[in-house]
């Protein structure tokens, strides 16, 4: 399977030196920051912009997620955002002229209790009403689609069915970042690595610049795409964000020939598994209960994830763990993102995606770019305003976000 990976040139973008000023500055060189810059240039003609990354390009959550892409969320607002994102995913390989191995192999969410079945069928019906491809699978259909799942009735949580979204799937995350970075660079966007933001320059309540480890950069538009560190950036700017940052751990096995044809999630057994293009099994579960900024694995989490995976897929008992890691997810009270202006004039924030950030990459960038360029929300991100936590117009996606958000 390794021969499927494309060849890459030594360099895909320039390592730019910061200019004294820009029309806009994007803080965070991950998927959302890159996508925002791409759509600012493509849709709004803004090319005098900079992406500031404190480490290396896409070295945060973009390189630390489990690459799942889907749009089968419950509420209308979420379905609108994620379905728009999925439609963009479907055209991006051609648009970016880059094979980032987008594979629409489908995603199953297993139901193990009667309550699971009721909630899952409700979500399928909601998806269909919103034009999202979704269907309900009986246990025999689950087994037919993914033969290695244990669907016996003598296990702790028998499989009672599953939701299924055929258009969902995975993509190779680092290739996605490189694809966006190359196009951004071609359109004149400066990508500045090893450039940590240390503060913001304000004139009253208006942002006029960014203090960085490479000096002051003047700008009157700032887009924050800092994921788990968004609250740190907001505090620097002088406002609070209603998010909590949690470590999320994942792991991969050694390489195998294809055995797992789709993506499978289970809330009760508490694991989700896919097989990457090279052949490794990729699995994760829920976020760590504590707040923190850790980016490493832990033995008790590894043990729980592997035991859950073996319970669902007995064949995996023969697999060996290859590596483990952690990312930093930013979680809001309603498990939905914030894509919004902030109390600081000229400053905008895109955060709170929980563990759903990767699947939302193009949709977030598309709508956030519109908000930065025009100063007003796009219809798709208008419901995800920061002030919803004051008005009470929450979008509670804890159920559909589920184990994998």
Image (spheres, rainbow, N blue to C red):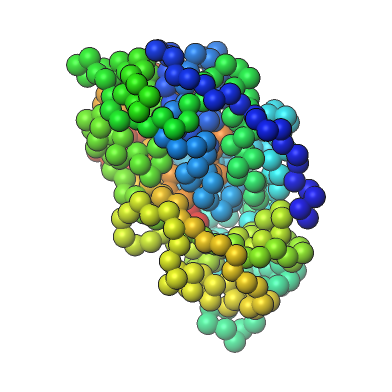
Residue 253 on image: x %, y %: 62, 65
Q: Tell me the residue at 28%/43% (across/down).
A: 242
Q: In which quarter of the image is residue 97?
A: top right
Left/right of residue 15 with respect to residue 239 in the rendered view: right
* Looking at the image, residue 6 lies above or below residue 139: above
Residue 124 on image: x %, y %: 58, 55
Q: Tell me the residue at 30%/15% (across/down).
A: 208
Q: Tell me the residue at 65%/46% (across/down).
A: 171
* Looking at the image, residue 216 lies above or below residue 250: above
Q: Which of 172/285 is in front?
A: 172
Q: Could you tell me if residue 183 is visible in this image?
A: yes
Residue 53 on image: x %, y %: 45, 32
Q: Quadrant of residue 296?
A: bottom left
Q: Which of 352/228 is in front?
A: 228
Residue 258 on image: x %, y %: 76, 63
Q: Residue furthest left?
A: 204
Left/right of residue 188 with respect to residue 245 in the rendered view: right
Left/right of residue 309 with respect to residue 197 in the rendered view: right
* Looking at the image, residue 220 lies above or below residue 264: above
Q: Could you tell me if residue 135 is visible in this image?
A: no
Q: Which of 360/1 is in front?
A: 1
Quadrant that contains the N terminus: bottom right
């Amino acid at each position: 399977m390794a021969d499927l990976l494309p060849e890459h040139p030594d360099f895909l973008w320039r390592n730019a030196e910061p200019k004294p000023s820009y029309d806009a500055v994007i803080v965070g060189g991950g998927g959302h920051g890159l996508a925002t810059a791409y759509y600012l240039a493509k849709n709004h003609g803004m090319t005098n912009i900079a992406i500031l990354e404190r480490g290396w390009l896409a070295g945060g959550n973009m390189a630390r997620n489990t690459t799942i892409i889907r749009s089968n969320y419950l509420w209308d607002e979420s379905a609108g955002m994620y379905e728009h994102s999925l439609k963009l995913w479907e055209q991006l390989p051609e648009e970016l002229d880059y094979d980032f191995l987008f594979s629409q192999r489908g995603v199953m969410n297993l139901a193990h209790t009667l309550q699971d079945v009721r909630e899952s069928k409700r979500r399928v019906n909601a998806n269909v009403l919103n034009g999202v491809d979704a269907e309900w699978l009986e246990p025999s259909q689950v087994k037919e689609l993914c033969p290695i799942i244990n669907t016996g009735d003598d296990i702790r949580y028998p499989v009672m069915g599953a939701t299924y979204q055929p258009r969902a799937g995975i993509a190779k995350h680092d290739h996605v970042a490189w694809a966006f970075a190359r196009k951004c660079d071609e359109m004149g966007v400066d990508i500045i690595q090893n450039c940590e933001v240390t503060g913001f320059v304000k004139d009253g309540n208006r942002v006029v610049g960014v203090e960085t480890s490479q000096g002051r950069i003047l700008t009157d538009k700032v887009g924050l795409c800092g994921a788990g560190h968004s609250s740190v950036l907001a505090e620097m700017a002088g406002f609070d964000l209603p998010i909590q940052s949690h470590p999320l751990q994942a792991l991969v096995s050694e390489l195998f020939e294809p055995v797992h044809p789709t993506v499978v999630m289970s809330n009760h057994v508490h694991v989700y598994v896919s097989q990457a293009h090279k052949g490794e099994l990729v699995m994760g579960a829920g976020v760590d209960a504590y707040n923190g900024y850790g980016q490493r694995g832990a033995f008790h989490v590894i043990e729980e994830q592997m035991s859950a995976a073996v319970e669902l897929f007995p064949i995996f008992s023969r697999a060996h763990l290859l590596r483990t890691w952690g990312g930093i997810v930013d979680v809001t009270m309603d498990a939905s993102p914030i894509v919004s202006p902030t109390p600081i004039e000229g400053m905008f924030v895109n955060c709170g995606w929980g563990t759903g950030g990767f699947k939302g990459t193009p949709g977030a960038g598309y709508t956030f770019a519109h908000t930065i360029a025009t100063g007003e929300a796009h219809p798709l991100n208008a419901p995800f305003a920061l002030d919803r936590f004051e008005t009470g117009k929450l979008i509670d996606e804890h159920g559909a976000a589920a184990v994998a958000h």
